[in-house]
Image (cartoon, rainbow, N blue to C red):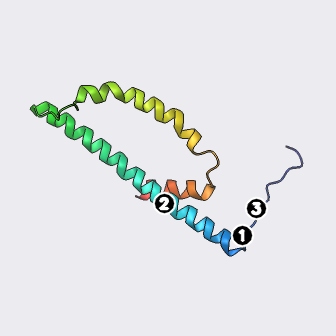
Amino acid sequence: MIGTELVLTIPTNLNSIISIVLALVDGLLFGVAIKKAITSVILAIVGLVIAGYIGINLPGINTALLMSKAPTIIAYVSKVAPQLLVGVPIFFIIGLAVGFWKG
């Protein structure tokens, strides 16, 4: 990589600036939504565990079923997640991180 340089240019075109701002805002919204979804899933699992402990079960959903499916779901998400971020603009990723952190 001798002789190659990274050239950063500041966009002067209005369409480029709007695209950057929209990618950042979109990332923020997705970050907040993902954080809320993760919180909701964790609270639902805790609620099911407590309900199962006191003897209340929803038909078709129980703690044993969720615990048996968890490794499969985690393996699938960890396999697919890197492929989803290929080609995503850096401003979307920055917005996603900030939205997840602050959301």
Pick out the residue farthest to the front: 60
Percent x, y of residue 62:
22, 30
Q: Amino acid at mark 1?
A: Pro
Q: CA distance from mark 1 to mark 3?
A: 9 Å
Q: Amino acid at mark 3?
A: Leu
Q: Amino acid at mark 2?
A: Leu
Query: Counting other residues with Cα less than 10 Å from the Cα at mark 1, is it few (<14), some (14-19), or many (20 or more)?
Result: few
- Of 50 and 87, the residue lying toward us: 87
Query: Counting other residues with Cα less than 10 Å from the Cα at mark 3, is it few (<14), some (14-19), or many (20 or more)?
Result: few
Q: Which residue is mark 3?
A: 8
Q: Residue at x 41, y 31 (%)?
A: 73
The mark nearer the N terminus, 2 or 3, is 3
Q: Residue at x 56, y 66 (%)?
A: 22
27 left or right of 42 in image: right
The mark nearer the N terminus, 2 or 1, is 1
Q: Which residue is mark 1?
A: 11
Percent x, y of residue 54:
10, 33
Q: CA distance from mark 2 to mark 3?
A: 23 Å
Q: Which residue is mark 2?
A: 28
Percent x, y of residue 27:
51, 58
